[in-house]
Image (spheres, rainbow, N blue to C red):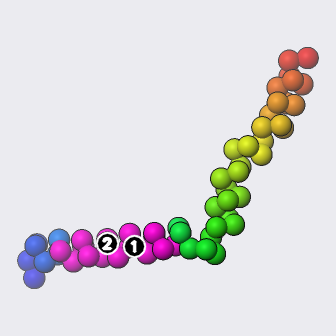
Amino acid sequence: MDINDLRGLSTVLLFIAFVGLCFWAYSSRRKAEFDEAASLPFADESTSKTRSQETHK
């Protein structure tokens, strides 16, 4: 086994890991979690406005 075999093997393993990550990210079981995470920046908007108004008084 030389360095080129090792490079080829690592490429194949990384490709398999990439495909697995894509399946994990786009699976329907994760949709609810990702939708919740996507709305997090907007959840604190009303709270942060109230805090900033209280500090300016």
Image vertical order of residue 45 relative to residue 38, above or below: above
Q: Which residue is mark 1?
A: 19
Residue 38 x, y percent position in the rendering:
65, 53
In the foreground, 32 or 21: 32
Hey, which residue is sitting farthest bottom in the picture?
A: 1
Q: Position of residue 46 (x, y in %)?
A: 83, 37
What's the residue type where badge 2 is placed? Phe
Q: Secondary structure at mark 2?
A: helix
Q: Position of residue 3 (x, y in %)?
A: 10, 72
User: For the N terminus, which image quadrant?
Assistant: bottom left
Q: Is residue 13 magenta?
A: yes
For the residue pair 27 and 53, the one nearer the viewer reads as: 27
Q: Rate crowding at label 2 as few (under 14), some (14 to 19) or many (20 or more) other CA atoms within 10 Å.
A: few
- Residue topped by disc 2: 15
Q: Tell me if 47 is positioned left or right of 42 in this view.
A: right
Distance between the alpha carbons at the discs numbered 2 and 1: 6 Å
Q: Please say if the residues under marks 2 and 1 sit with CB atoms less than 8 Å apart.
A: yes
Asked if the magenta segment contains residue 34, the reply would be no
Q: Quadrant of residue 27?
A: bottom right
Instruction: Give the label on residue 53, or none.
Output: none
Give the class, few, some or many, for how many residues have Cα within 10 Å of label 1's Cα (few <14, many ≥20): few
The stretch of residues the image draws in magenta is 8-24
Task: Determine the image quadrant of residue 52.
Answer: top right
Above-or-below relation of 51 to 25: above
* Secondary structure category for the residue under label 1: helix
Please state if 38 lies on the left or on the right of 16 as rendered.
right
Residue shown at 17% from the left, 74% from the top:
8
Residue at the image point whose x is 87% and y is 23% from the top: 53
Magenta stretch, main secondary structure class: helix
Q: Position of residue 22 (x, y in %)?
A: 45, 69
Image quadrant containing the C terminus: top right
Tell me which amino acid carries mark 1: Val
